[in-house]
Amino acid sequence: MSINRAQALILSVLVVLGIYSMTFTPYEAVYARGVWGTDFHLDPYYNLRAVLIGAGLAGGALSVLLLLLALSLKVIRADEGQGDFPLQAAVTLVSISIGWLAFPYWINGVFQAFIGNREVLSRMSVLDFDPKALMPTSWFGGCWRWVTFLLFYVLALGIPVLIFVDIAYALWTRHWRRAGLIACCLAIVAGIVYLQPNFGGWLSD
C-alpha cells in the first residue's frame, strides 16, 4: 500500500469514527459528582471511549509519521513517485485535527454538553469538564493537553495563511483539482478549530 493510500485510509476511518464519536454524552456520574469526583472506570462505556480515543491519537500520530516518511523519500532520496506533498500535508492536518484534537472532546461528551444537549443541561447546572480529569490527560499527564493546546492555537492563527498558500499553489501549479482537495481539507480543519463550542476554553480549563 502506498503512503498516499495509507493516509487516505486513516483519514476515512477517522471521519467515520468521528461522526459516531460526536454522539457521545458525558458519563452520568459526572452530573452529580463532577469530573474530579467521578471514577470513570465504572462507566459502562469506559472501554469503548478509551479504545476510540486511543485510536484517534494513534491515527493522527501515524499520519504524521507517514508524512515525514514521504518527505524523507521525496527530499532525501529525490523520489518523485511519493505523490503530491501539499495534499499529503493537508490530509495529515485533517487526521491529526480529528484524531488528536477532536476525539477527546467528542468522546468524553464535552461536545454534546456545549452544543446545548437538553438532557445534559437539565441534569448538570455547571458545565465543568476539566480536561485534566479526563482521558487522555489522565493517561499521559499534561503532555497531550499542552501539545493539543499549542496545536489548536497555531491552527487558529494559521488557517487563513494556509488558505492563502492554497490559492497561491493553485495559481502557480494550475493543479486545480489538488488545490480543491486541499481546500476541502482546510475547511474541515477550520470547522474543527472555529466551530467547536468553547473548545479553546475547555483546553484552557
Image (tube, grey):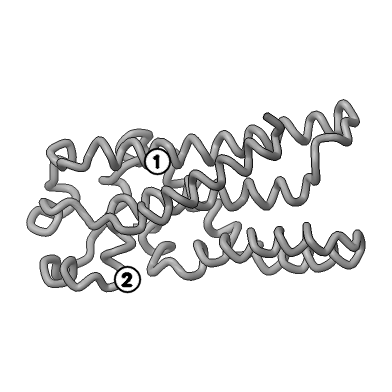
Left or right: where 23 falls relative to 61: left
- Point 75% across, 34% down: residue: 70
Q: Which residue is painted at 28% across and 39% down in the image?
A: 48
Task: Give how far across and how far down residue 46 sits, in percent.
Answer: 22, 39
Q: Which amino acid type is marked by label 2?
A: Ile
* Horizontal side of residue 150 vs 203, given as left or right: right
SS at badge 2: loop
Q: Percent from the top left, x then y, of residue 11?
A: 56, 46
Residue 138 placed where, x, y %?
30, 38
| Marks 2 and 1 close (CB-CB < 8 Å) | no
Question: Residue 177, percent across and down?
Answer: 79, 61
Residue 142's label in the rendered image is 1
Q: Is residue 71 left or right of residue 20?
A: right
Q: CA distance from mark 2 to mark 1?
A: 26 Å
- Which label number is shown at residue 160? none
Residue drawn at point x = 7 percent, y = 57 percent: 32
Residues 35 and 177: in front is 177
Residue that mark 2 sits on: 115
Front of the two marks 2 and 1: 2
The residue positioned 72% from the left and 30% from the top of the image is 69
- Give the mark, 2 or 1, whose residue is nearer the N terminus: 2
Callout 2 crowding tier (Cα within 10 Å): few <14, some 14–19, many ≥20: few
Q: Is residue 201 above or below residue 101?
A: below
Q: Is residue 78 above or below residue 145?
A: above
| Residue at the extreme top of the image, as rendered | 77
Q: Nearer the viewer, residue 11 or 144?
A: 11
Q: Amino acid at mark 1?
A: Gly
Q: Residues within 10 Å of mark 1 (few under 14, many from 20)?
A: some
Quadrant location of the C terminus in the rendered image: bottom left
Question: Under tag 1, what secondary structure?
Answer: helix
Say how many tags the image has: 2
